[in-house]
Image (spheres, grey):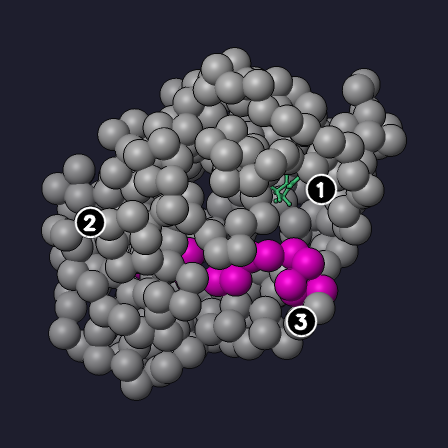
Amino acid sequence: MSVLVLGGAGYIGSHMVKRLVQNNQDVVVVDSLVTGHRQAVDPKATFYQVDIRDKDALREVFQKENIEQVVHFAAFSIVPESVANPLKYFDNNTSGMITLLEVMKEFDVKQIVFSSTAATYGNPVHIPIKETDPQQPINPYGESKLMMEKIMDWADQADGIKWVALRYFNVAGAIEDGSIGEDHNPETHLVPIILQAANGQRDHIEMFGDDYNTPDGFNVRDYVHVIDLADAHILALKYLAEGNDSNQFNLGSATGFSVKEMVEAARKATGVDIKAQVGPRRPGDPDILVANSDKARDVLGWKPNYDNVEDIIKTAWNWTESHPNGYNDK
Ligand code: UDP
């Protein structure tokens, strides 16, 4: 029996595939390669280049493979792009989920672990954010993911499809051996941008806003290592395999770091005096986003191994130094 990883050629998906393969699990990967990289997929996984909205092609994968559980990472995730082009997000993310659930139902596959996001909460009502807090997204990306959670819930009530939604906060780092890592084009995420400034690919990092309501004025996020995140998915698969009910969990470290603190941590991790400048705020950025992840720890038994952002950044730096141009280096 195999685990199907949709979006397994992406940053988080490829780390998940690697972890599953290390656990001797049979893995099937479906990815459109629109944003993913074929080289990121572990050679032991069976790969299909398929867009999840292509129902016939998806059906063919379910026909050929003996799929027992699904992990779904195949979604667009850039907030400003979703504001400019919301229909792209509702089409690929939300509508893609409907196609996937229809095919799962047809082939009697009843367990799915889903990449959800802190963006489903919108502006938090208090910090740290709990799973039971109101979900009021402030951008189409968050809305598309909240709709996906709700669609799964109704599919559970009607068809018994059991799901776990993992709501990520900020993900960073790479596998320790540096074989895979983060490579987006264009790059919008903080840690890879800081590291591009460290290795000379850009002159400096622009810190978006220094007038937030936080101790140092820079906005605060909760960073989790990508391998700790992948391990939470493996625990969620186990949770579903044991016959538990659908559920949702925040995945964060419960510790917040400001943009400035992240730059300082990166200076220590890399030994490079990274240039940083203060720029205007980026629209839609709340002051602080920090997760309460007690539920994942209590119910799933999740224990993140990385509790220090400097160590997280070191693993990302290892990848950046060995692949300065990302997967184009291969
Ligand atoms: N950020 C920044 N400069 C950059 C990119 C990001 O100051 O070039 C800040 C951004 O405002 C946010 C944090 O870094 O506070 C994390 O942003 P990222 O885009 O990595 O993740 P998000 O929180 O949007 O999911």
The front one of 232 and 86 is: 86
Q: Of label 2 and label 1, which has the lower sequence position?
A: 2
Query: Image quadrant of residue 47?
Result: bottom left
Relative image position of residue 254 (x, y in whole percent): 60, 24
Magenta stretch encompasses residue 179? no
Residue at the location (79% across, 51% down)? 283
Disc 1 packing (10 Å; few <14; some 14–19; many ≥20):
few
The front one of 55 and 170 is: 170
Query: Image quadrant of residue 279?
Result: top right
**Disc 3 to disc 2: CB gap under 8 Å:** no
Is residue 232 visible in the rendered image? The answer is: no
State left or right for residue 13 relative to residue 330.
right
Magenta stretch encompasses residue 77? yes
Q: Which residues are magenta?
A: 70-83
Badge 1 amino acid: Asp
Tag in front: 1 or 3 = 3
Residue at the location (49% across, 45% down)? 166
Q: Secondary structure at mark 1?
A: loop
Q: Secondary structure at mark 2?
A: loop
Task: Please tell me the numbered disc located at residue 267.
Answer: none
Q: Which residue is identified by label 2?
A: 42
Residue at the location (59% across, 69% down)? 89
State left or right for residue 252 relative to residue 136.
left
Q: Which residue is identified by label 3?
A: 86
Vertical arrangement, residue 147 with respect to residue 303, above or below: below
